[in-house]
Amino acid sequence: MYKAVALLAFVAVANAGVVPAGVAYAQPAYAGLAVAPVAKAIAVSPEPYDPHPQYQYGYSVADGLTGDSKTATETRDGDVVQGQYSLVEPDGAVRTVTYTADPVNGFNAVVDRSAPAVVKAAVPAVAKIAAPVAYASPAYTHAAPAYAHAAYAQPALSGLAYHG
């Protein structure tokens, strides 16, 4: 009897499997952190103020390659701004704008236009073309397709494979 119980216990242990753990599908928990607001001191310094601003600038461009020619100057003394700029228009005339701006009269501009400079247009050189080049069209030919039809051979049927 002892042998039978031992044999049955051995068979039970051999057939036993690992008990699976339970599987749970849940969103992971999120623990929010409490953060105390931080008071930040912002030091505000006033903008520097100039009660009597002054400046002066100017530039000039003379590009012989593109023909671009222009100048500009401007001065400021307190609230009075005076300036002048000039440019060459497409027809060759020079346009000059002189302006003044002040708190009493506002912005005033005077536009002067000088006569265009006489520019001789270059005469394009025309080359005489020789006789046209002779050109022979290629000869087109059509070749018939080269394929052969294979004759159909009906398979031989025997009485064993044919049910009919």
Image: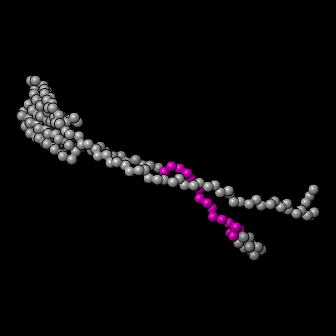
Q: Is residue 20 magenta?
A: yes
The quadrant in which the N terminus is found is: bottom right
Q: Main secondary structure of the magenta part?
A: loop
Image quadrant assignment for residue 5:
bottom right
Relative depth, front residue between 94 and 163: 94
Question: How far across and how far down the image is residue 136, in percent?
Answer: 51, 54
Q: Is residue 9 visible in this depiction of the protein?
A: no
Coordinates of residue 113 in the picture (x, y in percent): 15, 30
Q: Is residue 32 left or right of residue 10?
A: left
Lateral position of residue 29 relative to residue 53, left or right: right
Q: How many numbered discs?
A: 0
Q: Write the residue at 69% across / 60% down.
A: 146
Residue located 18% across and 45% down the image:
63
Q: Which residues are magenta?
A: 12-28
Please state, as top left, top right, bottom left or bottom right, where the C terminus lies in the image.
bottom right
Nearest to the observer: residue 71 or residue 80: 71
Residue sitting at x 43%, y 50%: 132
> Is residue 148 among the parts visible in the rendering?
yes
Q: Is residue 162 left or right of residue 34?
A: right
- Nearer to us in this view, 24 or 105: 105
In the rendered view, tell whether residue 36 sits above or below residue 51.
below
Q: Quadrant of residue 149?
A: bottom right
